[in-house]
């Protein structure tokens, strides 16, 4: 099962190097900020429960029912033909001020094969690698994994990992997953009611990831609990106090005459999760 999941961390020692001139440890952005945790690891009992759609009376198992309801709500929204239809991302449900900004976001984050500067936690793209690195330093913590499966505590820095995990590991069970906030439901009616409220205008978007919540309280509980350093990058274990850590998007060495790699410098990371700042800062130029 694990082999089907997108693993965005590469916890191998070869992805770090020391700069002899400065005594700094150089790490990849992906190793420093991203990761996943397998959770409890206990397989869930397959109940093969079914759920009934009250709109068309179809009876489906959990994953097919989730897909079915998503299709229903998308059709309802298309019939409404509101401005939101042209400014809401169909992939991550984030809303943008204009259709042009939405199309730029989709092209750079959700459909591109090009190496755009994308934050995998926020699912926002940035103009340059340097702006992305500054965004990570200002808004995220090392080993931050805010997307959590509420059934088994599998978690990841990437939403897609947790969604794929649910569809693989919790298929044919009595559980339904909300794609907006990752809340779990056991019966169809409350799930559909909750889902419908998310499609409305009154949402509380987390400023640090793609999740959206129905209440301000839920959003703040999520930010406090989930946007911390969950697991210290193992490349930092055993470092002498005061070691500077340089974060780069790639580890290619700077050759004479070559373009200088974008980088940021951090102090030695403490092993305990650092306290949440009272205000979060969002970097400029996100798409």
Image (spheres, helix red, strand yellow):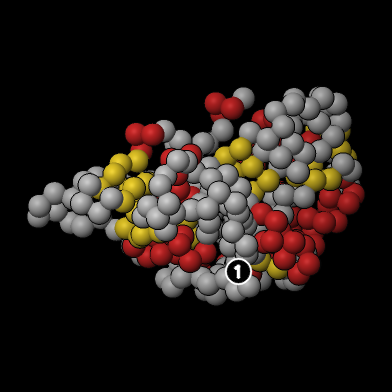
In the visual, does 163 lie left or right of 102? Answer: right
Residue 77 lies, in percent from the top left, at: 70, 61
Residue under the image location 62 percent in, 57 percent down: 227
**Coordinates of residue 135 in the picture (x, y in percent):** 45, 64
Q: Secondary structure at mark 1?
A: loop
In this rendered view, identify the residue nearer to me: 21 or 224. Answer: 21
Q: Quadrant of the N terminus?
A: top right
Is residue 49 in view? yes
Residue under label 1, please give it. 277
Q: Residue at x 42, y 44 (%)?
A: 239
Marker count (numbered): 1
Q: Residue at x 38, y 34 (%)?
A: 13
Left or right of residue 59: residue 236: left
Image coords of residue 105 (percent x, y): 47, 61
Report whether residue 120 is seen.
no
Q: From the viewer's side, name the closer residue of 165 and 245.
A: 245
When asked about the image quadrant of residue 156, the answer is top right
> Residue furthest toward the front?
241
Residue 199 horizontal/vertical position (percent): 73, 62
Question: Which residue is outermost to the left?
Answer: 257
């Amino acid at each position: 099962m694990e082999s089907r999941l997108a693993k965005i961390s590469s916890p191998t020692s070869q992805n770090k190097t020391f700069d002899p001139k400065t005594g700094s440890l150089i790490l990849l952005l992906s190793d420093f900020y991203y990761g996943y945790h397998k959770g409890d690891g206990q397989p869930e009992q397959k109940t093969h429960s079914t759920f009934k759609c009250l709109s068309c009376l179809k009876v489906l198992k959990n994953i097919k029912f989730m897909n079915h309801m998503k299709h229903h709500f998308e059709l309802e929204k298309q019939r409404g033909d509101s401005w939101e239809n042209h400014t809401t991302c169909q992939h991550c449900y984030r809303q943008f001020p204009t259709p042009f900004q939405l199309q730029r976001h989709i092209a750079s984050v959700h459909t591109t094969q090009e190496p755009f500067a994308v934050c995998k936690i926020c699912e926002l793209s940035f103009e340059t690698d340097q702006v992305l690195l500054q965004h990570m330093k200002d808004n995220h913590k090392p080993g931050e994994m805010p997307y959590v499966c509420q059934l088994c505590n599998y978690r990841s820095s990437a939403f897609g990992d947790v969604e794929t995990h649910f569809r693989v590991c919790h298929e044919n069970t009595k559980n339904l997953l909300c794609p907006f906030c990752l809340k779990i439901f056991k019966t169809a009616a409350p799930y559909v009611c909750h889902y419908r409220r998310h499609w409305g205008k009154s949402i509380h978007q987390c400023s640090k990831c793609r999740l959206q919540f129905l209440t301000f309280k839920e959003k703040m509980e999520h930010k406090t609990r989930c946007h911390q350093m969950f697991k210290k990058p193992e490349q930092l274990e055993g470092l002498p106090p005061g070691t500077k850590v340089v974060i780069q998007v790639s580890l290619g060495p700077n050759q004479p005459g070559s373009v200088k790699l974008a980088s940021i410098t951090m102090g030695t990371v403490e092993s305990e999760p650092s306290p949440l700042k009272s205000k979060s800062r969002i970097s400029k130029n996100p798409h």
